[in-house]
Every structure is written in C-alpha cells, then in structure tokens.
Amino acid sequence: MKIGGGKLSQNPEHFEAWQQGRPVGPLTIEVGATYGCNHDCVHCGFQQYQPYGKKRNFLERDAFLHFLDDFRELGGQEVYFAGNGEPLLNPHMADWVKHGDGLGLEMAMSSNGIPLTPKNATAILPYMSWIRFSVNGGTVESYTRVHKCREKDFDILWHNLKFAADLKKERDLKVNLALQFIVYDLDWDSIKPMVERHHEAGTDVLIFRNVGKPDGSFAEITDAVRSSLQWAEQQARVQVRWDTFTPAQATAVWHQCQAVHFKTNMDDRGNLVTCNRNLIKDSVYGNIHEQRFKDIWLASQRKQTVFEDVCSGADIAQCRQWCQVSYDNLFIEKALGQPV
Ligand code: SF4
C-alpha cells in the first residue's frame, strides 16, 4: 500500500507492521541537540520570543548513543538535528553521527555553518546524508542584518562551506550540501551575490524560499525581487520554492493524529515530544536521560496515555496550522479508509 510522502511512502512494510500491531517505532526523529545559538536571526521565533542569551544546554552523549541503538532496532531511518538552537555547538555531535551512520541511519542537520570548522567538517561530514545551511544574505551587510552576528562570521562561513564542498569532492562523500536563503526585505538586495557565492564555494544546491509563518501568512515581494528570483532559478544548482511565495491554501482536515507514530521529536533535555501540540498542551511522553527509548516506546504507561490523547485528534482545531505531520496525517487517514 503506497501512502504519504517522505519516509512513510518509502517504507510501506513499516506501516503495515504498525497496522498489524507489531512493535515498530518512528521512522524519523527531529532532535534539538542544543539549547542556545551563536546567531540571533531576525526570523528565528525562539530568539525573538524567548532569547537564549548566554544560556546553553546540551543533550547528553551516552543517553543519545543508546537512543540511536534503540531507534534503529525499532525500524528508525532518519535522525534530523534541528529544533531550537545550533546543533553543531553540541560537543558530542561527531560521536553521534559516526555511530548513527554505522547503524545504517540517515544523519541530517540544519545549521548556520559557523561551527563547521575544517576540523569539525572532517570529523562529521563523512557520516552525514545531508546538511541544510541557513544563509540569509549574499553580502556581509545583508547577512549581518539578518543573522545579527559579527561581520567576520560572513568570511568564516564561506571558508567553511568551500572547505566542506572540497572535502566532499576529494573523498567522494554522499553528503548533500544545501543552502537555504529566506527572502525578505532585509536581504533581498543580495540575491545575485548569493548565487555567485554559492557557485564559488561549490555547494550542491541553493534554495530560495519565503518566511513561513505559523498563521499561514507570508511576506510580499516586489516585482524587482520576483525578477531577481526568476533570474536566479535559471542558474545552475539553484531552486526557488515558489509555493512558499503564495498564501497558504486552506488545507483539508484530518480527524485523528496517527502520524505521530512515525515521526517524533526530542529536545536538549532528553524529553520525547509527540508533535507541535506541545506548544499548547504538554505532550512529553518520556525522557531518554531517565529511561531507555525502547522501554518508553513499547511499555511506558505515560507514552500510552499521551498518545491516546494526541491521536484522538481532539486538539486538531488548535494546532493544525503549524502541524509538522499534516500530510502524513492526511495520507494515513486515506490509507486507513477513513473520511478526509
Ligand atoms: S494536528 Fe496537532 S495533535 Fe495532531 S499531529 Fe498535528 S500538531 Fe500533533
């Protein structure tokens, strides 16, 4: 049975095992490995509403190594370091990606790229499937306006990216090096120089997109900016996500939230969280600093209670506009033959 996009459609046997009540875990997890960041981007919700300041907190090394073992054993496929904070500030990242890759997991990350020094890149890149670098500005002026960082970070970033691209070529690494540029009035004067920088560095792809707002609204662009983007998408290895430049369409509503069985989340304190419902109601179902993931997923009463609550769909009206797994919820509902 073919269902949904992403990991679900690639793993129909995992979905069928779940339908048959067999003990399978999530296919993907998004992990916030670090609390804190070295930048202060204007569009970063965490920094604007609850600034990190100097505070830092890191997910624990050994607990996460055990987690990787359990996650893989239960059928896990992809570990994506993102969430709030800069993942590469966590001092254990190299150990984790090496271990995860050795287990056959796809290791992926979003980063601002500044901590990916040549030493870190050499230790980390051979084990990564992809990295998405957040680079919002093709000139030092626009970059520092958005990232609110030191001017010298702009040069550090491009030095790091060039080193990473050269290393990939030299060692024939599988890692995909993607750059993401969020287009708005603070940086849209630097679209052309950004494309030139990307080509000089030799990175794999540059993606321009709009700011995604939780309420579905978007930032308007001028005709001149639209022309610049049309020029950009004609260039090699550049994509424009035009769908993000139009208002979000009203999406269909699903009736239950079963996708949380296939994608889950973890924060820097080791808390396991079902989904973005946690923004309105506590949806933490366990903690890997206290208990093994396998025991939590298969046998914890708390997990069962939280999942029954979330899966019932009782809160859909409040959280569907920022639901991370909306497409999967819709596809699962269709696959199960329930009304969409
Ligand atoms: S609609 Fe809400 S409760 Fe359901 S999966 Fe999405 S965020 Fe979670």
Image: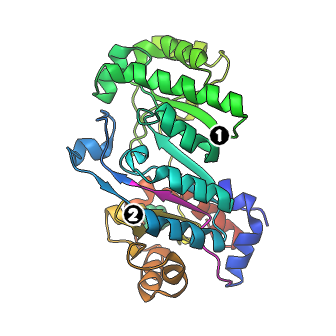
How far from the left and from the top, in percent, is residue 167?
Answer: 63, 30
Q: Nearer the viewer, residue 291 or 212?
A: 291
Asked if residue 273 lies left or right of residue 297, the reply is: left
Report the disc number at residue 60: 2
Q: Residues within 10 Å of mark 1 (few under 14, many from 20)?
A: some
Residue 183 - label: none
Rendering quarter of residue 1: bottom right
Identify whether 141 is placed above or below 111.
above
Q: Which residues are magenta?
A: 22-33
Q: Disc 1 versus disc 2: distance between alpha carbons?
A: 25 Å
| Horizontal side of residue 201 vs 183, given as left or right | right
Which amino acid is tagged 1? Answer: Val
Query: Which amino acid is tagged 2?
Result: Glu
Asked whether disc 1 touches disc 2, contact meaning CB atoms under 8 Å apart, the reply is: no
Q: Is mark 1 within 8 Å of ligand 1?
A: no
Q: Which element carries disc 1, helix, strand or loop?
A: loop
Structure colour scheme: rainbow
Query: Which residue carries the number 1 mark?
Result: 175
Q: Residue at x 39, y 50 (%)?
A: 90
